[in-house]
Amino acid sequence: MLHLSSLVSSENSNATVTTTTLENVSPPMITITNIANNKSIKVPLCVSDCTISDLKKQLLNNHEYMEGLFCKSNFPLKFVEDVMLIRNGKELKDTTCWYDPSETSFNVFLLTKKPQYFVKLMMEGGRTIIVDSEAITFESTVAEFKKFVEKRMRVNMSEVNEQRQLVLLRNQQKILDESQSIGMVFPSQSTLSLVFL
């Protein structure tokens, strides 16, 4: 970033001479730490648009930042309302004065909220159901998600029917690890298949 460091004027009998010196100034660095897993990233702060909303957008739209904070570049956080940034024990908002221009570096903590999870389930025979209950969040496990679907559809996915089992598929692949959070296995707004295998 270029910074105007000095403006010097000198006068003589003929003219006024103005000298401008430009020098490189590094932007302040923010260390953002995810409270859930203690993963941290460093982000340069662009002073020209240092609102909290802009900073959140910068995080959510950058795959490297998401990978650094969540170990997954497509972690299902899509909106600035999905995350909170905290400094000195208080949530940072656009209306709060949170940045001192004299600071060269500072720490901020990131806390994820629990957005409602939205998944489309395609059934054999073309039937479609939408799972958008507040009971299911991206932190719910695959097993919890399956139980929720079983209740909603009044089926038991562990039952074998005519030597076939009812299973969840994503991209034609059976979801095997049911202890993982659904946010790590498939993002919100995914389309899954529910089929007999």
Image: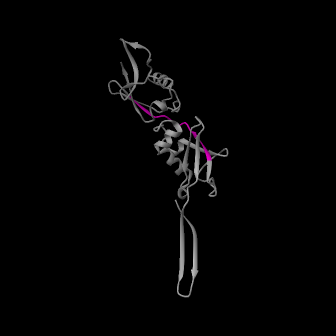
Residue 115 visible in the current orientation: no
Q: In this view, does 70 lie to the left or right of 173?
A: right
Residue extending farthest to the left is 125
User: Which residue is located at x 48 percent, y 42 percent?
Assistant: 64
Q: Which quadrant of the figure contains the C terminus?
A: top left
Q: Is residue 56 left or right of residue 129?
A: right
Tally the numbered discs: 0
Compared with residue 157, is residue 128 higher up or lower down, i.e. above or below?
below
Between 117 and 22, the one lying in front of the other is 22
Residue extending farthest to the right is 88
User: Which residue is located at x 47 percent, y 23 percent?
Assistant: 177
Q: In this view, does 158 lie to the left or right of 10?
A: left
The segment highlighted magenta reads 107-121
Image spot of residue 161 (x, y percent): 38, 13
Q: Main SS of the magenta segment?
A: strand
Image spot of residue 168 (x, y percent): 41, 24
Between 154 and 37, the one lying in front of the other is 37
Compared with residue 132, is residue 27 higher up or lower down, i.e. above or below?
below
User: Which residue is located at x 36 percent, y 11 percent?
Assistant: 163
Between 103 and 135, the one lying in front of the other is 103
Image spot of residue 88 (x, y percent): 67, 46
